[in-house]
Amino acid sequence: MRKGFKKFLAATLTVAMTAALLAGCGGNSSDSSSAKSDSTKEGGIEPCTITYYGGWTGADLEKMQALVDDYNSSQDTVTVEFTSLQWSDIFTKFLADYQAGASPDVVAMHTFEMGQFVDMGVLDADQVKALDLSESDYVKTAWDGCKYEDTLYGVPIDLNMHALYYNEALLDAAGIENAPQTGDELIDTAMKLTVDANGRNAAEEGFDKNNIKQYGFGFLQNHHTFYQTYAMMNQQGYNPFTDDMKEISLDADKTSKAIQFVEDLIYKYNVTPVGEKSPIDDFKAGNVAMIIDGNWQLSGLSDVSFKWNTAEYPQIFDEKAVWGASELLAFPASKNPDENKQAAAREFVKWLSENSAQWALSGQIPANVQSQEDSEKLPGIDAFYAEMDYVKFLPANPLSVSLFSSKAPSPILTMAQDATLNNKDAGEITSQFEKDLNDVMKNN
């Protein structure tokens, strides 16, 4: 068990005590189990209540809650109690509950978050093995992402990645027939779609960069800026991040080129607003013609007034690559294992995987191949499906959550802010980024 876990547990002692009290209140769950005791028992499972933790919010939460409700109503043996908070908060609760001897029965997480929990010894790979899953039933990238040191620690449920959203009406008005596919095409298209108050675009003489009314291109200027940089590093055939890395030495040339491309969009070509906070809202309002965002935005675009579409993430360098992530369902280790509840949890996870077609209604791509085939595909999802063969995940290194944290202070946020807000030299950003990453690894 890594020493960081002991530090974490000390920091969450208060939460653990609260969780223990809540666990005591949860003893009433046996009442609901006994109320179903006369129902048909499935697969030898006795009536019981199991707990399921996730980190979804908004529309995703609604869809997942609907799936849980469907499962609960589909049989009379197992009742699933679902709790969803922000990801960092649900993980704090999970570890506090584990320490209090009240682990949830199922917990969701992203593949890159898995390594820390394996290292802490709080995940039970034997429960996954007992499901006897077939690799061919799942998207290979998602399946492989659930492995740590060749052991499967979770069941993949979905895939998420970036792609290009574009306003077809604005492209048509500018005489642009196709969405950009390369870096040069992206810059050229974005310049034609960036228009000042006088009606001149960024490619025309006299364009006023200080008085722009419509931008050609937008993207999230936070941890997602790093995700784009990561994609462009991979497009150069370069990925320095691994499951077992102890120290990081960045290729200064390739990393700097990726960062420089991001900076140039804002400060050289003036096609992206400085400090943009919500590209999807800018896109919906018609103020930005193209954006990079994830498939989780698809379900919120049904009511826009203009015609839009998606395209694959542009190939800016030598080969195709795009950042992505996969969510998985894992079984927490328990200090007080209950074999009946473990069997019930496995049954629920299997059902959720095989019935995740409904999950696609929130814009997710099911990791289960049959669920993909059964799912109703939202408008715009095809570009994301086309990227599945070359999507690149961050590694499940035990320190990935700290290295790639979306909360400040964080190496990837410092890098993103230095590029998008401060326009620092790309080489200097790369050097500082490498130092910050290694500092995290040395201090944990």
Image (cartoon, helix red, strand yellow):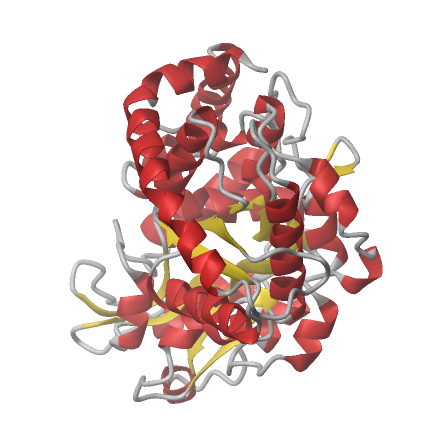
Residue 317 visible in image: no
Q: Position of residue 150 (x, y in %)?
A: 79, 35
Q: Position of residue 295 (x, y in %)?
A: 49, 66
Quarter holding residue 205: bottom left
Quarter of the figure that contains the N terminus? top right
Residue nearer the viewer, 268 or 85: 85
At 48% across and 51% down in the image, what residue appears? Answer: 52
Where 342 sits versus 73, above or below? above
Quarter holding residue 282: bottom left
At 59% across and 47% down in the image, what residue appears? Answer: 341
Q: Residue furthest front?
A: 38
Q: Position of residue 141 (x, y in %)?
A: 72, 53
Please give left or right for residue 300 compared with residue 389 in the image.
Answer: left
Residue nearer the viewer, 430 or 36: 36
At 83% across and 57% down in the image, what residue appears? Answer: 134
Please give left or right for residue 409 compared with residue 226 in the image.
Answer: left
Q: Position of residue 432 (x, y in %)?
A: 43, 22
At 58% across and 83% down in the image, what residue appears? Answer: 376
Where 99 sits versus 351, above or below? above
Where 324 sits versus 117, above or below? below
- The number of discs equals 0
Residue nearer the viewer, 28 or 376: 28
